[in-house]
């Protein structure tokens, strides 16, 4: 019988088979674990942004923050040392003007006082010059962007100080950097040589040290180190070629991938080295325009309270695109406080932008974000997002995610239904990455083992169970576990929700309440014109319009322009009524300005461009038309029934009792037939039967005619004199002479 081949395998072959099986099992386990396995291998780390000019306050801040992180990591369960990444930015205010003393002190602190850190890395994304270069070269490793440069160290408007030579040389030696290169960057006038030796080595040698170097090395090439007249400037390409810079990275996210630290670590942590001062802000319901002003007030209040940790709790089904975009801008702009998004329930639709704008995202087990397909209008209707809106939201989501260290591909997949999300091994960093299929296909040599995580067809919805595997946050059971995660066990945090002002604004901006405010404001304005003096109707009308514009101003739909247009409309009407009587240019202009301001104050857009905006505009115009029709109907009813109401009939002025011919109604204007002109009334005196503001009625003898006052206002039952007649327009002024024996009674026949 022939024995199986396996039975004749010797020990070496069995060992090889065992090792191969273990390797395959390990590989399969890693693939099954996905990104969570990679996350377990991640190293704790943190970015620290240093913006010029470097001052002693900068050193104090960096010292407190770095020591806090190092001590926290050392005292953790695993006791792993963190990677400290210092991002140096020249800033816009004073690039290249850092003081030597402060810069050298910071460099000295980084070089010798951070022994508890696993690694110190300087990241230079932009050209950096001046003494700020010193703390950059004091780090263990240097990473530059392709457009970045280093040097010269001595600012161009300053002369080289020989006293700085020895401290800088000592710093270079301590960090095992080429001291001659650093001294050549310090002194632009120094003769620095680029020397290549027979062993293919590249060396920077000062001319004064070259003779000694030639004695010990065989030189094959000797040339000036600086090219193109840029003395003392080291480019990213040269630094990478010479080993001065370890790698090239274009963004902080690339640096995080290189060193396998969490993406959120690329954002500064304002709580490091400081006493925690937390606040809690709830964001509930649809994201509307009123949320923008609410969030702005709450964030400013947190700053006044000197808070440095803000928890945003979300429970929102979506909302308006413009409002969500504005609130996301408010949150992402917070750089003096650590922002944490707590998705206890949901942040779906366009409200998904808001958690992406926070530094940290923490999910409750059942929490959800994503599924961006629709938005909720101001009137509570669901509307599908247009292709242009989806493209814009996808770009915004990717921007927010990149800004706060979240996976940009995941953010896009929550909005772009056709996006295919994949996981691949990045050959450059050796870590797993989440990216879009088109990105992986564009560089097949770099991204290997591509596996699909989300198929095209539907936008991505992320739950608490999915979030860690997608690199989008952590999961907790409840609020207490969340507080424990940030070292706030047992601490009572005051929850900030919408106050009575916000609730009132939400109520007043409801479409039906807004319609009622418009109706009351317009109706009371008409009523005031029918009643003498400025009384209760004028006050109610002013209050209604004030509430309308105040609520829309706080909700973000109205601004100074709308309020100014409305006030200009009122002024134009006042000119038409009291200064230049007659229904003319000022009257029409005033009405148009007031209506335009009301329409503009009802929307966030000035002119509709989208389909839903046209619908919203149409509904607003219908709403305004109904208000005007209601005012007209109310005016008719008022004229018919108001005088008969016992309580209100005393407010309406009536003509004085008639003592003339019986059977003649004094309120009926006599026929003007037979009169070619009313100029015969010039100089006659009569008595007003209604207030003149400036138009009204007055009786001259047995004639009741329409008259216009030549000044602002004349009380009822006042003596007036006719001063001008133009056609049927009779202008009067208040009688200032003695009381006439008769009230200007006219014998119409005799006068004719």
Image (cartoon, helix red, strand yellow):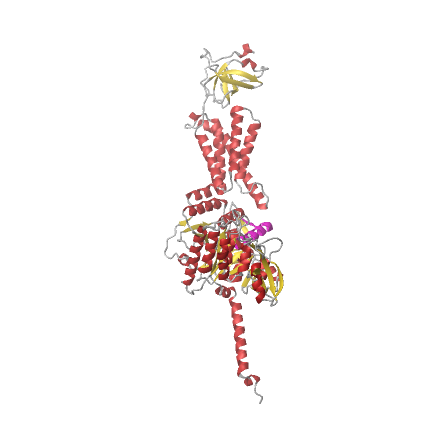
Q: The magenta stretch spans which residues?
A: 381-401
The residue at the point 52 percent across, 13 percent down is: 683
One can see residue 495 in this view: yes
Furthest residue in direction bottom, as rendered: 1
Q: Position of residue 155 (x, y in %)?
A: 53, 50
| On-image quarter of the N terminus | bottom right
**Which residue occupies the foreground of this view, 287 or 617?**
287
- Look at the picture and state if 305 lies above or below 439: above
Furthest residue in direction top, as rendered: 750
Q: Position of residue 23 (x, y in %)?
A: 53, 73
Q: How many marks?
A: 0
- Look at the picture and state if 435 lies above or below 11: above
Magenta stretch, main secondary structure, is: helix
Q: Position of residue 330 (x, y in %)?
A: 49, 48
One can see residue 467 in this view: no
Q: Is-magenta flag for residue 383?
A: yes
The residue at the point 41 percent across, 53 percent down is: 274
**Which residue occupies the foreground of this view, 471 or 577?**
471
Q: Position of residue 328 (x, y in %)?
A: 50, 49
Q: Is-magenta flag for residue 371?
A: no
- Look at the picture and state if 657 lies above or below 434: above
């Amino acid at each position: 019988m022939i024995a199986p081949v396996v039975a004749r395998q010797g020990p070496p072959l069995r060992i090889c088979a065992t090792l191969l099986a273990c390797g395959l099992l390990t590989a399969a386990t890693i693939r099954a674990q996905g990104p969570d396995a990679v996350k377990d291998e991640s190293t704790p780390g943190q970015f620290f942004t240093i913006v010029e000019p470097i001052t002693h306050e900068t050193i104090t801040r960096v010292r407190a923050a770095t020591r806090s992180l190092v001590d926290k990591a050392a005292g953790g369960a695993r006791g792993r040392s963190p990677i400290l990444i210092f991002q140096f930015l020249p800033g816009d205010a004073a690039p290249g003007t850092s003081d030597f003393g402060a810069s050298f002190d910071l460099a000295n602190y980084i070089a010798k006082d951070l022994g508890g850190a696993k690694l110190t890395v300087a990241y230079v994304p932009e050209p950096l010059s001046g003494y700020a270069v010193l703390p950059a070269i004091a780090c263990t490793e240097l990473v530059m962007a392709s457009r970045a440069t280093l040097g010269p160290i001595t600012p161009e408007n300053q002369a080289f100080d020989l006293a700085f030579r020895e401290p800088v040389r000592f710093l270079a030696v301590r960090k095992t950097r080429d001291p001659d290169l650093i001294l050549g960057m310090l002194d632009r006038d120094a003769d620095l040589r680029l020397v290549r030796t027979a062993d293919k080595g590249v060396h920077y040698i000062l001319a004064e040290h070259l003779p000694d170097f030639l004695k010990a090395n065989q030189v094959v090439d000797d040339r000036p180190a600086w090219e193109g007249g840029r003395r003392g400037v080291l480019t990213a390409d040269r630094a990478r070629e010479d080993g001065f810079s370890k790698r090239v990275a274009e963004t902080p996210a690339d640096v995080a991938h290189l060193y396998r630290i969490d993406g959120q670590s690329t954002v500064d942590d304002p709580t490091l080295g400081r006493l925690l001062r937390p606040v809690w802000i709830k964001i509930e319901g649809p994201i509307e325009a009123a949320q923008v002003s609410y969030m702005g007030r709450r964030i400013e209040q947190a700053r006044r309270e000197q808070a440095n940790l803000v928890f945003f709790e979300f429970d929102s089904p979506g909302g308006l695109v413009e409002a969500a975009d504005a609130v996301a801008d408010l949150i992402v702009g917070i750089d003096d406080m650590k922002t944490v998004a707590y998705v206890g329930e949901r942040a779906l639709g366009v409200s998904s932008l808001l958690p992406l704008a926070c530094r940290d995202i923490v999910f409750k087990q059942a929490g959800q974000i994503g599924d961006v397909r629709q938005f909720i209008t101001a009137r509570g209707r669901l509307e599908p997002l247009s292709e242009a809106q989806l493209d814009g939201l996808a770009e915004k989501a990717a921007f927010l995610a990149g800004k706060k260290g979240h996976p940009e591909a995941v953010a896009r997949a929550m909005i772009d239904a056709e996006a295919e999300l994949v996981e691949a091994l990045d050959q450059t960093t050796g870590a797993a990455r989440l990216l879009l299929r088109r990105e992986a296909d564009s560089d097949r040599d770099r991204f290997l083992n591509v596996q699909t995580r989300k198929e095209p067809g539907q936008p991505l919805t992320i739950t608490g169970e999915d979030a860690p595997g997608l690199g989008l946050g952590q999961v907790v059971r409840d609020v207490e576990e969340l507080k424990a995660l940030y070292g706030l066990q047992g601490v009572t945090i005051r929850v900030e929700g919408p106050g009575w002002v916000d609730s009132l604004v939400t109520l007043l901006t409801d479409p039906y309440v807004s319609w009622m405010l418009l109706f009351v404001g317009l109706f009371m304005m008409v009523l005031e014109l029918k009643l003498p003096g400025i009384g209760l109707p004028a006050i109610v009308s002013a209050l209604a319009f004030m509430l309308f514009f105040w609520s829309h101003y706080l909700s973000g739909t109205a601004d100074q322009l709308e309020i100014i247009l409305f006030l200009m409309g009122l002024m134009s009407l006042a000119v038409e009524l009291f200064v230049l009587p007659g229904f003319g240019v000022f009257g029409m202009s005033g009405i148009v300005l007031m209506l335009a301001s009301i329409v503009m104050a009802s929307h966030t857009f000035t002119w509709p461009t989208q389909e839903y905006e046209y619908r919203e505009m149409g509904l607003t115009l219908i709403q305004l038309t109904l208000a005007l029709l209601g005012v007209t109907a109310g005016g008719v009813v008022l004229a018919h029934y108001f005088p008969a109401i016992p309580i209100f009939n005393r407010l309406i002025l009536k003509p004085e009792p008639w003592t003339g011919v019986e059977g003649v109604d004094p309120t009926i204007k006599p026929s003007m037939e037979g009169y070619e002109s009313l100029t015969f009334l010039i100089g006659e005196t009569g008595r007003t039967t209604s207030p003149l503001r400036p138009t009204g009625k007055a009786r001259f003898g047995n004639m009741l005619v329409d008259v216009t006052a030549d000044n602002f206002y004349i009380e009822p039952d006042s003596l007036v004199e006719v001063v001008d007649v133009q056609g049927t327009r009779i202008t009067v002024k208040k009688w200032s002479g003695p009381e006439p024996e008769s009230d200007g009674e006219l014998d119409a026949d005799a006068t004719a």
